[in-house]
Image (cartoon, rainbow, N blue to C red):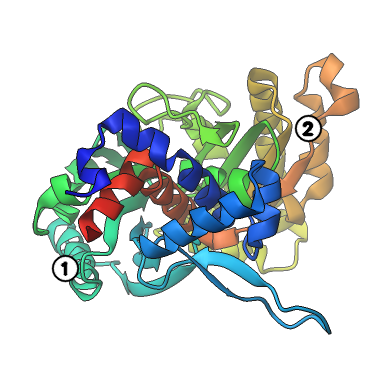
Amino acid sequence: MTRENQDSPSAAQQRWFGAAQLIALARAEPGITRAAAAGQLGISTGGAADLVARLRKARLLDETPAPAAGRGRPTTILGAHPDGPQVLAAELRAGDWRLALAGLDGQLAIVAQARHAGGSQQQLLADMAAAIAAVRARQAGRIRAVAVSVAGTVSDARLVQFTTRGWTDVDLSVLTAELPGGAADIPLLLGNDATLAGLAEARTGAARGAGTALHVLVAVGLGGTLVVNGEPVTGAHGAAGEYGHVPFGDRAMVCPCGARGCWDLSIDGRAVARHLGDPPPDDPVGYAHDVLGRAAVGDTRTALESVASALGAGIGGLVNLHDPDVVTLSGLAVPFRAAAPQAFSDAYRDGLMAFRKSSAPPVRDGDHGDDGSLRGATTWALDHITTEIALAQWAQRDS
């Protein structure tokens, strides 16, 4: 019987604590050397060598030669083991879905994707489930978690509202229900796209290093998250951050969510169409990009200034609420601000309490662009499989 078989959960946690720290450091700082990692973790070079050897034996980390940098003794860098554990990250958006595979280094490889403009709910979920099952079958037991980013409201384990598709109260457990072992073998993690995009920006993007970061994403509507010390504030049921449904908009307007005056209705492509006198677009995101691609003159300029002002004013209100160090933007929020920067800036400052105006948090474009939500889902899944207990369980499988 191996030591991992004999260890209690608490003993396993102690035994794998240093390993979890080293793996987290290798994820956070790609290309770090063993010596540099030892210095940051406060352990001896000999202790680091022993730890890396144990992680190589467990197929968790590996060392590879660093790129040549002139004369001198070659060095090696830490990275994911080529046969180590992996995660699947899925992204369900208004018009398509994607599936990506990642190892402990968090590097994404898109392994499946498809449009779903006209398919039924059942067919769409069946297609995604089949893709997940096919990837798992090819990876010979290496996949340890599946995380799904959804462009809708997620509460507990259900997609309670997916406005662009007209879905309500959808059980997404079907995505892994048919896998051998089901949820007991591979946990399914469900999250909102804006929440996960904010997580990615806080960990490895434009808000990295900030203690408190506010993220805002605009697509069909608006969502976001508050990330504190690298962890998103998700609420009691995982549905926090639905900023688009705070009453910053016109109280005369009823949102598809059922509430009045939602900020959503003043921000996205539907708002632009309303300002231009166009009918509600079937594809608000595509419509917004079309308008943004025109010369911003006349009515188009006025419409974009109105949307940018509504965006800036609302973000000012959220800064008053949350007191973040930094604000990051993704999705349509980035080009909307860029199309009317003065209107955005004026509205943002006007929305701030007086004492904040002289030191307003900077508002930055996100670093991860359209991949933010998928990267956030990957990060979340990797967090799940790199706890001390999870690492012990992986090592136990080999033994």
Q: Which residue is mark 1?
A: 130
Find disc 2 in the rendering and name its residue.
361
- Amino acid type assigned to the residue bearing label 1 in the image: Ala
Question: At which x and y percent is residue 254?
Answer: 41, 30
Of pointers 1 and 2, the one earlier in the residue sequence: 1
CA gap, disc 1 to disc 2? Answer: 44 Å
Q: In this rendering, is residue 191 above or below 378?
A: above
Residue 50 appears in the picture as rendered: yes
Give the vertical position of 288 relative to 390 (above or below): below
Q: Secondary structure at mark 2?
A: loop
Residue at the spot 17% in from the left edge and 72% down from the top edge: 137
**In the rendering, at what x and y percent does residue 158 appear?**
23, 38
Q: Quadrant of residue 308?
A: top right
Q: Position of residue 120 (x, y in %)?
A: 16, 61
What residue is shown at x 51% (from left), y 58% (from top)? 52
Q: Is residue 17 left or right of residue 158?
A: right
Numbered tag placed on residue 340 in the rendering: none
49 or 123, nearer to the observer: 49
